[in-house]
Image (cartoon, coloured by chain):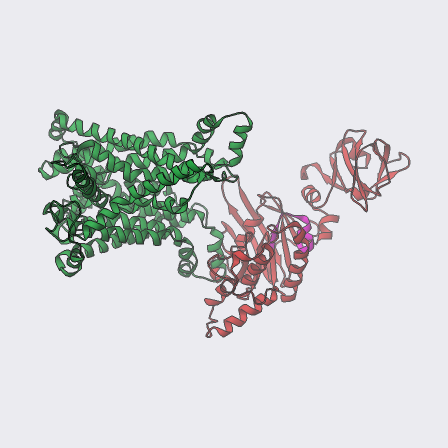
Chain colours: A red, B green
Amino acid sequence: MREGGRVGGDGGGSFLALDELQVRFSDSVTIGPVSLSIERGEILALLGPSGSGKTTLLRLLAGFERPDGGRVRIEGEDVTGVPPARRRVGMVFQHYALFPHLDVGENVAFGLEGRGTRDGGSGKGEAVAAALALVDLAGFERRKVQELSGGQQQRVALARALAPAPRVLALDEPLSNLDPSLRERTRRELRQLIKRIGITAVFVTHEQDEAFDLGDRIAVLSAGRLNQVGSPEELYERPANLFVGTFVGRANVLRGTAARALGAAPGQIVLVRPEQLRFAAVAGGGALSGVVGERRYTGAAAFFQVTLDTGERVEVQAAPDAARVGERVHLSTTRTLQFAESEG
Amino acid sequence: MTRGGGRSWPAGAALTLLLAWLVLYPIVLLVLDGMHGDALRTFASRSGEWHALWASVWISLASVVLAALIGVPLAFLFEWFDFPGRKLLGSLIALPAVLPPFVGVIAFLFLYGESGFAARFLQYLFRFQEAPWHLQGAGAILLVHAYSMYVYFYLFARAGLARLDAATLEAAQALGAGRWRTLTRVILPLIRPSLAGAALLTFMTSLGSFSAPYVFGGGFRVMTTQIFASKQNGEMGVALVETVALALVALMGLAVLRHTEGDAILAGLGKGTAPQRRALRRPLVRLATTVAGWGFAVLLLLPHATLLLVSLVPYATWTTETLPPVLGLVNYGRLFAEPEQLEPLVNSLWMAAASTAAAVAVALAAGWLVVRRRVVLRRVIEGLLALPWALPGTVFAIALATAFSVSAPLQLRWVLVGTIGILPLAYFVRNLPVTGRAILAGYRQLDPALEEAAASLGASPWRTMRRVTLPLLRPALAAGASLAFVAALGDFVTSILLYTYRNRPISMEINAALRVSEMGVAAAFGVVLMVVSAVVLGIGARR
């Protein structure tokens, strides 16, 4: 939490601020206190494994949960006690939650009805058409939501959330219900769309790729605690602790003799990424030795599973022809990260 | 907001108290009042009481067996085999369900009674001097029960069979099991929860059955008719003891059958596709099945047809002839032209509508508190909603009559007996289980994210309810409300104990018409009940 994260405290001037938010589910399960500040037009990813509290944070932001402590501010206004209906946070739900008894147009118009846009229907119709055009579904007004594909449903959910012009867009695992083949493209389109509108967005994901592709900054959570907030580069290059180091990107974790061989002080843990390991010609100072046990070919490169003399296994990313299975190899590092044992 | 329903506890407590007052309190008062020494001694010393209690038990058990013997084979036939007319017959076969119990009983009386069509026809054929049989006693009651209750086994077993995974049956065959072994070792165990559910429903229904023993029992008494007789004789103390005894038997039956219903896991396992229907190919088998199927359907429809025919017979025009010589719409004309006759129709409609609306409102509140708010008392609320189902209608009628025959506002008791309010109140209490069950199930299937989506789009709680929750609950609401409405509309057992002249419902008017041998008017009322019930159930079942 020291490096790279603009964490807490400076929420005064930011567009959206979570100050010391805290929820107690039971004595053993608590979330927070978490503080985050998000700039206008920024896309923030809440990344973490299941049970890390990321969805709860999003629901606190949207107003579906009440915090036991702390506050939520949007544009300087304290909205902690404001019910969801008056908070003006657009929400895209994990399973979209489209109203099955309404058609596409009625779904999108739902949020426009209560908000003083009752100008005889034509204005509303235009707003619906504009929202649908935004997500490339122009002319879909009279379709039934059950007839749409998963990707189209996701876009209707987005159009519905955006139509009433919310101040913040909240997305709960927006891509998890899509075909893997669709996800990557949708990710790019979603980011372009959000940037084009310029809306401030917060989304929840448990997938690192999604967080990296979609988010300007990423907040990494585990067990209800905020570990680090930063850009993808910051998280990957300068993880604040061992959890972030291993959760974001692939990593080899070395302790004891192997760690000391790489120059770590006693009690230090060494984290080294597969591409930061090199096959070396001879054993030298600060190097490791072992035998290649497995090779996994991915095209441009290959991953080699090396069992070290100390018994640990590490993964090395190298050119496909860099080593053979069963070959005895020596490894050197281009870069390592070190953490104190207690940080694990 | 969603944790433990914190701020909803006052609403939860209020609903719990309301339900406890309406459902539990009368039963408690009934038990307390029934525990008086004299009445207990009288009850224990009369052999007739024990005979009636035993008759209730064995009639109910025999009804379960008979209903299963008819319903289960039919379910297999209609679920597994294909033959001409299967679809039409499959829905016709559920028809006894649209006959209110009392109307079904009088239809049987007109059809199989001593001067009914069947007897007259045999007399005509064989020149008998007298009716060949008396439709009376235990046999007659069982006949009516079997006719009206096999539907439970038929519907439940069909649903169970439809959930079976064809792969399990194929696995049994691949392991070398023959047809019989597959049936006894695989199929029956798998549909056991469905069969146990049907058995429970049949047992409880026949334990509470009043119309059939009332009309056909003669000297043969079961507990429900025994209670009615005691009350008519002014032995209210004995009636209370009898009611408590019947309630105990019902609760015991419920406990035993609940226990066997047990593992729902069995049914939950099957996620595959149901076995394919097999077309009957051998011409002879096909012909026999088709003929038997249609024959059976005609048999089932005969009571309905009889009712219709009798309703067209003007008063005193049909004496000794096999078929009525004069037919006309006179009876229907009287029904709607004479205010005396129209009144019970209006009474039944408003009481059924009001009690249904109230039960739906309570069930909606319960659904919101139990499923959405998950209030602390949610289990208590669910239990109280289901309780009236566990006790026969007679028990509740007597309990309400006991609770609301005293003016003691401090004990929350007012005099309602003898007013027009008590009957709709009784209908309402009796309607709580069916509306509660349907609406709670509907609420549980409703994704909470839909209501959250509405809120995040700026909808107020009221608008969310009106635009999202209620439209999506519509199938559950319609199903629960239609069943409740039909039950209240055709009710006989509660009405006969609690009605006053000013709110006499249709069933009481039918009973009165029968007493003065106005068969045509009684049948016309029956037809009206049947048609309204069928229409309402049809609307309720629409998706």
* Nearer to us in this view, B283 or B472: B283
Q: Is residue B466 magenta?
A: no
- Considering depth in this image, is A257 or B540 the residue closer to the camera? B540
A19 up-or-down from B168: above or below: below
Residue B13 in view in this figure: no
In the rendered image, residue A215 lying in the magenta stretch gets the answer yes
Task: Give the residues in magenta.
Answer: A203-217
Residue B22, how many percent across, how many down?
A: 25, 45
In the rendered structure, the answer to whether residue B432 lies left or right of residue A49 reads: left
Horizontal side of A224 relative to A339 (left or right) equals left
Judge whether B100 appears above or below A217 on screen.
above
Residue B456 coordinates in the image, percent (x, y) = 50, 59
Q: Quadrant of residue B337?
A: bottom left
Q: Quadrant of residue B209?
A: top left
- Is A119 situated left or right of A274 in this image? left
Q: How many marks?
A: 0
Q: Position of residue B131 (x, y in %)?
A: 14, 36
| Residue A43 image-quadrant placement | bottom right
Residue A100 in the image, given as x and y percentages of width and height: 48, 56
Q: Can the viewer see residue B457 in this picture?
A: yes
